[in-house]
Image (cartoon, rainbow, N blue to C red):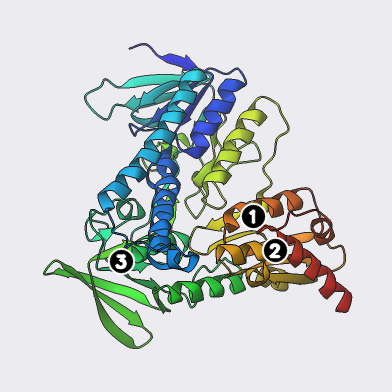
């Protein structure tokens, strides 16, 4: 089959890859995308961000109906869980969004190839990409002067017990259980483990979280992380901190997991073990070594401000390069990559990437934590406002949590905002906008916030910064 020549070939159709492809096509390039999966959207749309949020929302509604409706004067029979229908709804949400990406590819005349891509060297000035079909299809060779690597990441395993898809599972598997586990053991106290642990806790599982560090969410503002753990404990989640898993044995349909904490060793018997200890770049079999692309000590591809690798004409974004493994980070990089490729001066403001934990209550943050400011000896003032005193939160019966605004003590410029509470995921956008434009706590305090709304808590926290700065 003759070579097909494109202006840009994107390997991987996750959030970074499909956004880059669409933006490049909009800017007039002839674009091809190679994706091994039948569905577009990558991990985020198919087995991460979207299905997990669909199940989080469904399980949240189940708990509201079971435990909270009566407080609002709504009496119903105890709700019954139909897990099959809940999973079907989740799958429908995913399908509609992945179909939407396919429509955008068609609309922007992007050529799609399903298969496994590998860098095969150069032919003149063009890079050659071999695409191996996942079935009996004939291999194809694609050529282009520019290739973007956007293959994302994969879940890391615990060496003592690798994934088997049944007893020891990844986040992908935990989104498709056919029944509610009686006891789910979560290895890892990061956001993925806490979110999926929350889903199955709400649906009736006993959930135990094992974390080797002394705190959960080590990169999160300490007050927020501590408040979230207290809330999750109240909901019934068990935490075993400074604890490691050492072995697993399957007996009588159960997992017998050996855990160690200091000199103490004990056994936990559970139905399933969700391993959520982090993710690593998915770069195997891309041909990086043969091509000479430089990879750092963490397995990330080294790139410059244009996302160019050490090999001319080959670029990389998303989870393959340095930075938090977040879909919105990859999407922004994809857009900026395409624009810079065409000579535009677009940039990614990495210091203003928001992070969100979709538990209940939600937690969201942007910028520096107090711990970071203290370590860097940056003078700051902290303002805080509890949702307990917010009118809308009271009406919603969602009063757990607070907003904390951190601002430079001398200039008032906002250095970080940390929220734990209802709809924190939506509220953080105001903080990102203010910080992107170099705004101050006073700017927030002087801006109208409609009453009664949850966002008034951000204004009140900013006002508290001003009070503390005056009286300090």
Give the residue at x 29% y 57%: 81
Using the image, determine if residue 292 lies above or below residue 272.
above
Identify the mark nearer the N-term, 1 or 2. 1
| Separation of marks 3 and 2 at Cα, in angstroms | 33 Å
* Foreground residue among 110 and 83: 83
Q: Earlier in the sequence, mark 3 or mark 2?
A: 3
Residue 245 percent location from the top left of the image: 32, 73
Q: What label does residue 427 carry, if any?
A: 1
Which quadrant holds the N terminus? top left
Is there a contact, CB below 8 Å, between mark 1 and mark 2?
yes
* Figure quadrant of residue 28: top right
As drawn, the label of residue 457 is 2
Q: Which quadrant would residue 414 be assigned to in this image?
A: bottom right
The residue sitting at 28% across, 59% down in the picture is: 80
Q: Is residue 276 visible?
A: no
**Viewer-proximal residue, 81 or 281?**
81
What element does badge 2 sit on?
helix
Rate crowding at label 3 as few (under 14), some (14 to 19) or many (20 or more) other CA atoms within 10 Å: some
Q: Say if 75 sits above or below 322 in the image.
A: below
174 relative to 19 in the view: left or right: left
Judging by the rendered image, the residue that carries numbered circle 3 is: 204
- Picture coordinates of residue 328, whole percent (x, y): 56, 45
The reply to whether dot 3 and dot 2 touch (C-beta < 8 Å) is no
Q: Quadrant of the C terminus?
A: bottom right
Q: Mark 1 or 3 closer to N-term?
A: 3
Badge count: 3
For the residue pair 182 and 193, the one nearer the viewer reads as 182
Q: Secondary structure at mark 1?
A: helix
């Amino acid at each position: 089959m003759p070579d097909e020549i494109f202006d840009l070939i994107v390997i991987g159709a996750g959030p970074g890859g499909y956004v880059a492809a669409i933006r490049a096509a909009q800017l007039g390039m002839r674009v091809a995308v190679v994706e091994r999966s039948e569905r577009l959207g990558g991990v985020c749309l198919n087995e991460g961000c979207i299905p997990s949020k669909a199940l989080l929302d469904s399980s949240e509604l189940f708990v509201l109906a079971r435990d909270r409706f009566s407080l609002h004067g709504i009496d119903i029979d105890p709700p019954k869980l139909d897990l099959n229908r809940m999973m079907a709804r989740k799958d429908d949400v995913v399908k509609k969004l992945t179909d939407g990406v396919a429509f955008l590819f068609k609309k922007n005349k992007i050529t799609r190839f399903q298969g496994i891509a590998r860098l095969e060297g150069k032919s003149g000035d063009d890079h050659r990409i071999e695409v191996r079909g996942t079935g009996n299809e004939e291999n194809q060779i694609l050529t282009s002067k520019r290739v973007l690597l956007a293959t994302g990441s994969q879940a890391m395993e615990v060496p003592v017990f690798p994934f088997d898809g049944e007893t020891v599972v990844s986040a992908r598997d935990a989104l498709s259980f056919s029944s509610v586990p009686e006891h789910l053991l979560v290895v890892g106290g990061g956001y993925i483990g806490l979110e999926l642990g929350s889903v199955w806790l709400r649906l009736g599982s006993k959930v135990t979280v094992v974390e080797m560090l002394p705190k959960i969410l080590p990169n999160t503002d300490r007050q927020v992380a501590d408040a979230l753990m207290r809330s999750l404990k109240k909901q019934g989640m068990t935490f075993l901190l400074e604890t490691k898993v050492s072995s697993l044995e399957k007996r009588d349909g159960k997992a017998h997991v050996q855990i160690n904490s200091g000199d103490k060793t004990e056994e936990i018997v559970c139905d399933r073990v969700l391993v959520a200890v982090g993710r690593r770049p998915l770069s195997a079999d891309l041909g990086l070594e043969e091509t000479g692309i430089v990879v750092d000590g963490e397995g990330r591809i080294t790139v410059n401000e244009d996302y160019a690798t050490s090999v001319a004409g080959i670029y990389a974004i998303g989870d393959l390069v340095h930075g938090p493994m977040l879909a919105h980070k990859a999407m922004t990089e994809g857009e900026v990559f395409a624009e810079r490729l065409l000579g535009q001066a677009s940039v990614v403001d990495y210091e203003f990437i928001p992070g969100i934990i979709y538990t209940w209550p939600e937690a969201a943050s942007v910028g520096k934590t107090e711990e970071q400011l203290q370590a860097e000896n940056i003078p700051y003032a902290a303002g805080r406002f509890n949702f307990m005193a917010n009118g809308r939160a009271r009406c919603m019966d969602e009063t757990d949590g607070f907003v904390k605004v951190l601002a430079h003590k001398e200039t008032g410029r906002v250095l970080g905002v940390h929220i734990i509470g209802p709809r924190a995921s939506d509220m953080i956008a105001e903080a990102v906008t203010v910080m992107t434009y170099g705004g101050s706590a006073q700017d927030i305090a002087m801006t109208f916030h409609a009453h009664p709304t949850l966002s008034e808590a951000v204004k009140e926290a900013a006002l508290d910064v001003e009070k503390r700065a005056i009286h300090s």
